[in-house]
Amino acid sequence: MILQPETEIRRKRLLWRATHRGIKEMDLILGGFVARNLDAFSEVEIIDLERIMDIPDQEMLAWATKQEEVPPQHASPLLARILAYTP
């Protein structure tokens, strides 16, 4: 599949953001998931990932460790896959 230059730039930016979160656990969970799956993401999944990247690490870590439920406004199939990922 040939990607448009802008799509490739977005993917590289997302990979960087996913692997440099600030909390090591989220680097491993989110960064690991994105590194493993980003090349197969559809345009819709890229848009959803860009939205997910704006969620604070502390909130996402609480969801990943099952300390809190994911609020409905943040729930998505992609986020569920990320939170289920085991590095």
Image: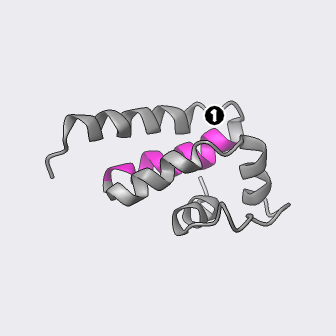
Q: Residue at x 68, y 30 (%)?
A: 22
Q: Residue at x 83, y 62 (%)?
A: 68
Quadrant of the rendered structure where residue 72 is? bottom right
Query: What colour scheme has been applied to the protein in the rendered image?
Result: one colour
Residue positioned most to the front: 73
- Residue 47 can be seen, yes or no: yes
The residue that label 1 is drawn on is 21
Instruction: Name the residue at 36% across, 37% down.
Output: 10
The span picked out in magenta is 26-39
Residue 5 percent location from the top left of the image: 21, 34
Task: Give yes or no for residue 34 being in the magenta stretch.
Answer: yes
The foreground one among 38 and 36 is 38
Q: Could you tell whether 1 is left or right of 70 in the image?
A: left
Judged left or right of residue 10, residue 22 is: right
What's the amino acid at mark 1?
Arg
Residue 48 locus on image (x, y percent) = 49, 55
How far across and how far down the image is residue 84, in percent? Answer: 62, 65
At label 1, counting other C-alpha atoms closer than 10 Å, the crowd grade (few under 14, some 14-19, many 20 or more) is: some
Q: Is residue 54 above or below residue 22?
A: below
The verdict on residue 25 being magenta is no
Say if residue 41 shows up in the picture: no
Nearer to us in this view, 33 or 57: 57
Please tell me how many numbered marks the rendered image carries. 1
Judge by depth and name the residue closer to the eye, 7 or 35: 7
Helix, strand or loop at mark 1 = loop
Q: Residue furthest right?
A: 67
Question: Majority secondary structure of the magenta segment?
Answer: helix
